[in-house]
Amino acid sequence: MALKTQKKPKAKAPSSSVEEQEALHRFMDMSYDVMIIAEGDGSIGFANAAFETVFGYARGELEALRFFDLFETKPDPGKLENFTARMHTKDGHAHWMEWHCETKGSRLYCVGRDLTGSKRHEAALIKQQKQLSEAESIGRMGHWHWTIGQDDIEWSAEIFRIFGVSGDEFSPSIHALNQLVHKRDVGRVIQGFQRAIIEEQNYDMEFRIMRPDGDARYIHCEGRCEKDEHGEVVALFGIMQDMTERMLYERELREAKESAERAYAAKSQFLTNMSHELRTPLNAVIGFSEMMQQQLLGPIGNDKYLEYINGIHESGEHLLDLISDILNMSKIEAGKYELDLEQLGVVKIIQAACHMIEMRAQESNITISLDQMKNKKLQIIADRRALMQMLLNLLSNAVKFTKDGGSISVECHERKDFISIKIIDNGIGIPANKLASITRPFEQVSLSYARDHEGSGLGLAITKELAELHGGSFLIDSTLGVGTTATMRLPYDASKTAP
């Protein structure tokens, strides 16, 4: 019996070319790329769904479109295979498109990819890189990356500038870096890299480099560890910053500070050494002139000698006051002025200071009154000598700058945490712009109508410093042409408040 072989059924062909075309169009609509079939006159015969998505034209609007009219700059008809161009959408937006075209007969088959997002991202990346480069240039800082096991190192442009080399002629590597690092610092740099790898920790170091032009630079390097998914260190990266200007500036400041300290120490030592040499002859001049003034060894024949003796005595006392002020200020500035604290009767010391200055006040017909002294037995713990000096400084100033016939008032008030001693005069006053500087050493107020008085300019500065040594304060309130109020605030017990 003969067996009949059964034939395989043939694949069923589309019923018509229309169905084939519809199937092709459905297939093209599935693509995210723009697909266009353009006729020879540029009219669009077909565009897939991606074209509508990108350009915003519905298929019913294709008949009125010309493919080349969509381009910002019409492409060269002879170069339509592969090109990139800017095109306009229906709503006027610009899109970057990459086209691959092929001509078949009179038709042009085109596949386009929207590069707008990529171009925008690329522009943002270029902008960020430019900003980073400018920031690194301003900060004289560059970044680097080194993969462990490799010799090459990735450097940013700023590190090339820091090291004084060109990227075209110099290839950064571990070996090349060691050649530029100062010989005394090479070992420390290598150890820093090795320690970071072994200990898996971030690090920073400073080292010197010698640039090809012979210039030495100071570099600050900070490194970080880059690890893989297993936690192993696979690379180091970080920054290098040129610290040369800062290092040189700090060195100059340090040298200037040391020089100033040496000069200050020399001045203090000089003043200390000269104190006895200056005071001893002055004491002799003042002492002998006093003896001659009082004519202890008998009368002086010529009255003119008495005038000269008075001049010698006054000059000696004035010079001694100046030297004492300078020496006291020097001790205070050097931190060597020590307070000898004891319990004091404040009112008695104020009365004694006023009595000492009274004769000088009477010469100018100035009256000194002690008001607001209710508690005659007021006691504080302070330095007697310092308190007397502060009072004499302020009273002396008040007498100097109060016109003939003026008045000075001294007050003492008890407050909660301190006593307030006020010396008020109706003298020429102090300009407002001088109040802030009048308590600085050697500062003096100079007025065209002020009486000329000699002085060191240290009285108020010493008073302020002595008040603060007690843990108190010193204030001045003055009105030009009206008068001045100098206020000392002192604690009741300086042993608890003195710094």
Image (tube, rainbow, N blue to C red):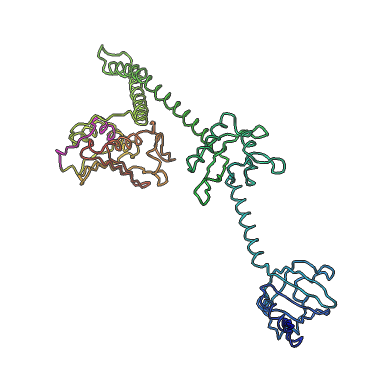
- The reply to whether residue 52 is in sight is yes
74 versus 190 height, above or below: below
Front one among 314 and 488: 488
Side (left or right) of 107 relative to 344? right
Residue 405 x %, y %: 30, 40
Residue farthest toward the top in the current orientation of the protein: 297
Front one among 235 and 138: 235
Side (left or right) of 213 relative to 407? right
Front one among 419 and 3: 3
343 versus 89 height, above or below: above
Quarter location, residue 340: top left
Magenta span: 375-391
The stretch drawn in magenta includes residue 139: no
Residue 221 x %, y %: 54, 41
- The reply to whether residue 90 is in sight is no
The residue under the point 27% across, 36% down is: 498
410 versus 20 height, above or below: above
Side (left or right) of 81 relative to 313? right
The residue under the point 49% across, 32% down is: 254
Residue 40 x %, y %: 83, 79
The stretch drawn in magenta includes residue 381: yes
The residue under the point 25% across, 34% down is: 387
